[in-house]
Image (cartoon, rainbow, N blue to C red):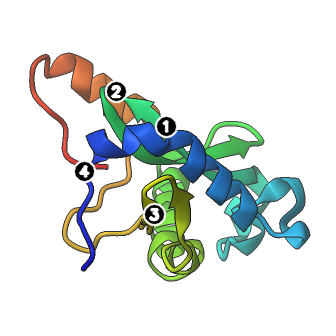
Amino acid sequence: MPQKWYPYQLTAYEEEIREALGREHLEEEGDRGLAIYLHHKLLERKVYSMQPSVESWNGELWGVLEVQTFGMLSRGELEELKAEWRGQCSDGFGEGFEQRPVMIEDGELYISFWNPYSFQIQTEQELKGEQEQATGIQMGGP
């Protein structure tokens, strides 16, 4: 029977998960990663690369998307990029990744970047800035 793991428990497996994410990278994606799948033409020109990863922060493991751009994105472009990442998590990259096990000493982990009930996308500045302003308040799950 599947067991639910919490973000604080997954910090112990950060390296294994990061390595599994690296194995997901397809040769045809080159240095650009998921950016080659962008549907928005302006973003396609402004975003150089999109690489899924994980990061421990504040005692929890977070799914992250490392993005390199040519210049700053406007607010609208950032929102469009978030929508593209949401689609990748639910139907693209994320759908495939969650079906392949991450091998750990105790067995297999299946990691999902998508949760239809508790899913949020924030920039690092939005997340960490809010946390600093809300001292003592725990942020929502990754």
Determine which quarter of the picture holds residue 130: top left
x and y, in percent, of residue 125 in the image = 42, 29
**Identity of the amino acid at label 1?**
Glu
Whether the residues at callouts 2 and 1 have beta carbons within 8 Å, the answer is no
Tell me the CA gap for discs 4 and 1: 14 Å
Q: Nearer the viewer, mark 4 or mark 3?
A: 3
Q: Which mark is residue 134?
A: none
**Identity of the amino acid at label 3?**
Gly
Tell me the CA gap for discs 4 and 3: 17 Å
x and y, in percent, of residue 111 in the image = 44, 64
Q: Residue at x 72, y 43 (%)?
A: 69
**Identity of the amino acid at label 4?**
Tyr
Mark 3 Cα-neighbour bin, 10 Å: few <14, some 14–19, many ≥20: few
Can residue 123 be spotted in the picture?
A: no
Q: Which mark is residue 6?
A: 4
Q: Which residue is mark 1?
A: 55
